[in-house]
Image (spheres, rainbow, N blue to C red):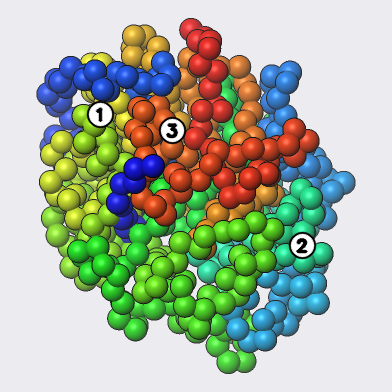
């Protein structure tokens, strides 16, 4: 099998809060893009009727957080969520199996004073009540209240949705402390709770949650022992330390925690929350077994969309290098604490079990009932947090704390070599580096191609604003493969955005695609998020290497070939998108010897469809379609 050599980088997202600005000239809508060349024979030679694929990526919502009470409409469909597992009732109250989602606090050192990746019952005690969800610094009014009144508004949304930027503020007179909009905020049972209620509308800004690598390893609490493992859960991940970790990893005992119980919150689709995603799930195919690829945040979880792998710290020429000591993470607890990390930084060497935090994770992986290649090679340091790329969106070199340019290759390189068109459409791209108030709203760490050493050379042909996507959809000039990322105001990220804005963004793109009937007949749109944002999810987790996978996240496939309201249970993650592109466009080989597109498609038992029998395994998303039928 031929392999492409590949490398990747991710960055830390800096979200600009847009206040008191006026939209710069020329920001309302991009001029029509030049006509695209006619598709090549290679481009048209697909394994399916799909000639155009779009993936739209929002931010930071787990599957249960969004689909907690969803009920499928298709007669043959079933879904695994908080409602079907009887953890909650349809009205959002605790269900008969609520104890399966109980949350515990840490009361003794699970690993003798070293970093722990799992905790025994002797080391934890059930919370009496959930630590109160915190308002987390969200303001009394929307951080984007000025946008609707500005000429043109944000060019990423149509005029009828601009008002959403001005709604959803907390209305509270404080920015830290319990979010009193949540019903019974200080007396919630120790498990999942419904965020929305009489004084908390769905269209609201809410507090953010912690979701970095070492913290998430602890939150999911995985171990291979009788307390953790069952047939349905052979990897032993209990998801029962969500709140305990957020309140202990960096908060001194003398300070009030400000990232607490909100990680357990969920929306209620049966009561009208997330209406557009419910509509999509009802009419098309969704997955209830699609996962964030790694444990951690936006940067590392976006890399697999381009590389099916993680990026290591290099010398800029493809060889491993060692970061400065001040940038190496030490999650071992400080003396006299249970879990106050010694040194929060950026990089870790997972091949060296003597490094802080590594031994506990390595021991767990070795105990799994199947063989896992860690993908941790000697001298390679990987990201524990988001780190900015070496280039700006326009391809200008950046200095300071950045990911050095990588010599590894991406699926974009492979597409270009095969004369298959592709583009990355990023909201705020046109504003980057200008005087526009939207300057800074583009998500650097979300673009997997921005970390490559050849990035400046591909900007002109492949990097665009989302406004250019609107033009390409209208003109029928959509490339074969499209990545779409909204700007930071409308990506759905808690605190800095809200889910109503992302729904409006995604709906606009879907409707534009459907309005061009010839284009729509051969198009598939995947709608997902980068990662779960630290929100609780009850689903099975399959480790495939040292980095993950992680909890489930939403995924809906919208296409004439995915209608019917079906639910797929095949184990997928962002690397599955790379596999889809490779298979659909007949790209033989994989990106590298270590990339996840080498993994086989899952084989599962009918009575246990969420757990592949051939672990480690991830799918290629073909399971979300019926290519024998098209529904017009």
123 horizontally vs 552: left or right: right
Say which of 316 and 216 sits in front: 316
Which is nearer the N-term, disc 2 or disc 3? 2
Residue 282 in sight here: yes
Please report contact status of discs 2 and 3: CB closer than 8 Å, yes or no: no
Q: Which mark is residue 228?
A: 2
Q: Secondary structure at mark 2?
A: loop
Please report contact status of discs 1 and 2: CB closer than 8 Å, yes or no: no
Q: CA distance from mark 1 to mark 3?
A: 14 Å
Q: Which mark is residue 580?
A: 3
Q: Secondary structure at mark 3?
A: helix
Q: Count of labels shown?
A: 3
Picture coordinates of residue 545, whole percent (x, y): 52, 58
Q: Secondary structure at mark 1?
A: loop
409 horizontally vs 345: left or right: left
Query: Which residue sits at x=61%, y=17%?
Result: 564
Query: Which residue sits at x=34%, y=9%?
Result: 518
Number of the front mark, 2 or 3: 3
Identify whether 338 is placed above or below 149. Answer: below
Q: CA distance from mark 2 to mark 3?
A: 34 Å
Identify whether 283 is placed above or below 373. Answer: above
Query: Which residue sits at x=80%, y=72%?
Result: 121
Identify whether 542 is placed above or below 480. Answer: below
Q: Specify the farthest residue to the front.
A: 1
Query: Which residue sits at x=25%, y=59%?
Result: 406
Residue 186 in sight here: no
Picture coordinates of residue 463, whole percent (x, y): 21, 39
Q: CA distance from mark 1 to mark 2?
A: 46 Å
Q: Which residue is mark 1?
A: 420
Mark 2 Cα-neighbour bin, 10 Å: few <14, some 14–19, many ≥20: some
Number of the front mark, 1 or 2: 1
Picture coordinates of residue 77, whole percent (x, y): 70, 25
């Amino acid at each position: 099998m031929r392999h492409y050599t590949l490398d990747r980088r991710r960055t830390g997202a800096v979200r600009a809060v847009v206040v008191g600005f006026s939209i710069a000239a020329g920001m309302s809508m991009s001029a029509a893009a030049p006509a695209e060349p006619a598709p090549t024979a290679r481009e048209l030679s697909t394994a399916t009727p799909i000639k155009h694929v779009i993936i739209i990526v929002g931010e930071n919502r787990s599957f249960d957080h969004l689909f907690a009470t969803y009920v499928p409409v298709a007669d043959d469909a079933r879904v695994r969520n908080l409602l079907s597992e009887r953890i909650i009732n349809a009205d959002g109250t605790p269900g008969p199996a609520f104890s399966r989602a109980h949350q515990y606090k840490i009361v003794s050192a699970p690993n003798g004073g070293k970093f722990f990746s799992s905790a025994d019952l002797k080391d934890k005690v059930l919370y009496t009540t959930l630590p109160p969800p915190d308002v987390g610094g969200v303001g009394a009014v929307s951080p984007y209240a000025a946008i609707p009144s500005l000429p043109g508004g944000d060019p990423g949304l149509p005029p009828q949705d601009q008002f959403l930027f001005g709604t959803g503020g907390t209305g509270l007179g404080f920015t830290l402390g319990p979010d009193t909009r949540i019903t019974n905020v200080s007396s919630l049972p120790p498990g999942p709770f419904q965020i929305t209620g009489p004084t908390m509308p769905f269209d609201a800004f809410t507090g953010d949650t912690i979701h970095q690598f070492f913290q998430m390893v602890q939150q999911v609490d995985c171990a291979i022992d009788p307390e953790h493992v069952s047939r349905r859960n052979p990897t032993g991940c209990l998801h029962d330390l969500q709140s305990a970790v957020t309140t202990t990893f960096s908060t001194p005992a003398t300070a009030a925690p400000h990232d607490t119980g909100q990680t357990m919150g969920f929306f209620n689709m049966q009561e009208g929350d997330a209406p557009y995603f419910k509509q999509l799930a009802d009419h098309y195919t969704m997955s209830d077994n699609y996962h964030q690829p790694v444990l951690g945040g936006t940067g590392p979880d976006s890399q697999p969309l381009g590389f099916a792998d993680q990026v290591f710290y290099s010398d800029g020429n493809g060889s491993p290098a060692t970061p400065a000591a001040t940038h190496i993470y030490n999650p071992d607890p400080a003396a006299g604490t249970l879990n106050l990390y010694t040194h929060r930084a950026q990089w870790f060497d997972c091949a060296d079990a003597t490094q802080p935090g590594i031994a506990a994770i390595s021991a767990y992986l070795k105990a799994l009932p199947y063989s896992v290649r860690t993908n941790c090679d000697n001298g390679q340091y990987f990201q524990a947090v988001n780190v900015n790329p070496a280039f700006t969106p326009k391809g200008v070199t950046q200095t300071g704390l950045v990911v050095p340019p990588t010599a590894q290759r991406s699926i974009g390189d492979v597409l270009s070599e095969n004369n298959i068109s592709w583009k990355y459409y990023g909201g705020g791209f046109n504003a980057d580096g200008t005087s526009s108030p939207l300057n800074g709203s583009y998500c650097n760490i979300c673009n997997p191609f921005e970390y490559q050493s050849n990035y400046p050379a591909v900007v002109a042909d492949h990097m665009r604003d989302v406004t250019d996507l609107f033009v390409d959809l209208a003109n029928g000039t959509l490339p074969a493969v499209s990545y779409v990322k909204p700007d930071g105001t409308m990506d759905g990220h808690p605190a800095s955005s809200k889910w109503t804005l992302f729904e409006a963004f995604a709906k606009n793109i879907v409707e534009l695609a459907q309005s061009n009937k010839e284009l729509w007949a051969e198009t598939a749109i995947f709608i997902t998020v980068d990662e779960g944002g630290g929100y609780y999810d009850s689903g099975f987790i399959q480790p495939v290497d040292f980095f993950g996978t992680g909890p489930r996240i939403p995924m809906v496939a919208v296409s004439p070939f995915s209608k019917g309201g079906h639910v797929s249970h095949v184990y997928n993650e962002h690397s599955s998108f790379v596999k889809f592109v490779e298979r659909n466009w007949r790209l033989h080989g994989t990106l590298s010897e270590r990339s996840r597109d080498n993994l086989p498609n899952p084989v599962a038992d009918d009575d246990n469809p969420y757990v592949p029998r051939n672990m480690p395994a991830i799918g290629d998303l073909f399971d979300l379609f019926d290519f024998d039928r098209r529904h017009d």
